[in-house]
Amino acid sequence: MLNFRRHSFKHGVHPPENKDETNALPIRQFQFAPLIILPVSQHLGKPPRVIIREGQEITRGQLLAEADGYMSVPLHAPVSGKVKKVANVPTISGKMAPGLYIEPFPSSTQEVLEGEAIDLENSTPAQILNGIQNAGIVGLGGAAFPTHAKLKIPEGKHCDELIINGIECEPYLTTDHRVMLEQPDDIFLGIKYLLKATGAKRAIIGIEANKQDAADFLSDKLDPQEPVSVEVVPVKYPQGAEKMLITSLLNKEVPSGGLPIDVNAVVVNVATTAEIGRLLPHGRGIQERVITITGPGIKKKGNYLIPIGTPLRFILDEVGVNGPIAEVYMGGPMMGMAVSNLDISVVKGTSGIVVFTEEQVSRPKKVYPCIKCAACVDACPLSLNPSKLGLLAKFEQYELMAEEFNLMDCFECGSCSYVCPSHIPLVQYFRLSKSIIRKRKAA
């Protein structure tokens, strides 16, 4: 069943989509780099514990690092090769962190090891969650939160609706769009695993109206015996944020400081769902993911299946760049991070690589005082007051920001910065403020 919902969340913005150059390009396997640089920490939570040694030969899919606690997932070999060294590697944060340098075998077929399959019919919800953790699956939409932990229903709560997030509202990115068109069987099998794991009564695949071909395609493949529907929502940023999608699809509002399960819902990215359907029947771990490589600075734009740990510099050499590079984003330009080092590698949470040259990038504009126009208030999807929060951040009133103005509800979508006529980098202020608040609490 395909429905179009006119209801949506309040506020939001409409940045240029810039998806036309890649949304019709099929997923292609990317070249294997001559050196894989693999950070051990690939997700939120505790990093896994390395169990291999320098000089060891490994096979693609082999366990390299085992989960170190509940909020941790293992790391699997993205290639068959030899561990050249166990040492610190560069990361997107600008810091060095523990990692592995792996040289792939040039003549290897790069086949993936089979593991212990998770049988859908005979497995319990706990066994499915354990299988998801053992596969190293995290949120592939960018957050990289351990999926098994997200799916664990807290005591006293229950899940009625499972929402599969196929919105992909971030400009330039078309990863999820292509996954929906090319991996429908994996998606529907993944939904079956998720329904059983969460106990949800039904699943809704939410898709934005600019991906009507994907919505029609998945709708035509629905099994009438399964409690699954496809619903199309209006195009608006940040429609893909789980709280906003819940409002659009269920007309429910997640309370301040709350989670989707507080309104009896669980939201899972569509690419994450496809990985569950692809990996669990074979007991495999995640070793690669689909990434959109695009932007005005890229020659061979496309959607590529890229091994985790492939260096960014190698990727850009392979696809080619148009002129001197000015900015490179991991993720999209709204919520992604600008990189300062091309020697970092793609990780599980890398959904896109967007490249701009000097011609497209305007230099930082002068920041003017806030003129109290309230454009940021009108844009904020959570109805926060970014203007007031920005002023408090300037004067380092961090506790006041969190306690009275709900700073921690902000998910850093960037809508406020996008519309600010004074060019105030509000979202950067909020990221820094939240980081300071977390450090103070930890201390």
Image (cartoon, helix red, strand yellow):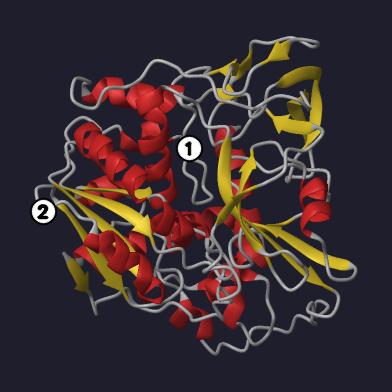
Q: Quadrant of the C terminus?
A: top right
* Outermost residue, right side: 324
- In the picture, measured across the screen, residue 337 lies left or right of residue 362, that is left
Q: Residues within 10 Å of mark 1 (few under 14, many from 20)?
A: many
Q: Residue 248's quadrant in the figure?
A: bottom left
Residue 388 visible from this viewpoint? yes
Please give the name of the residue rendered at 44% of the width and 22% of the height, measured from the top-left corner.
134
Residue 340 can be seen, yes or no: no
Q: Which mark is residue 417?
A: none
Q: CA distance from mark 2 to mark 1?
A: 30 Å
Which amino acid type is shown beneath numbered disc 2?
Pro
Q: Is residue 406 above or below residue 93?
A: below
Q: Residue at x 56, y 76 (%)?
A: 20
| Amino acid type of the residue that numbered disc 1 sits on in the rendered structure | Val
Disc on the earlier residue, 2 or 1? 1
Locate residue 235, reporting x and y percent. 40, 77
- Against 114, residue 262 (above or below) is below
Residue 6's spot in the image, x, y percent?
Answer: 24, 80
Determine whether the residue tagged by mark 2 lies in a helix, strand or loop.
loop
Report the side of 61 relative to 240 (left or right): right
In this picture, residue 8 sits left or right of residue 111: left
Q: Which residue is mark 1?
A: 138
Q: Nearer the viewer, residue 115 or 355?
A: 115
Q: Which mark is residue 224?
A: 2
Quarter of image, res 212? bottom left
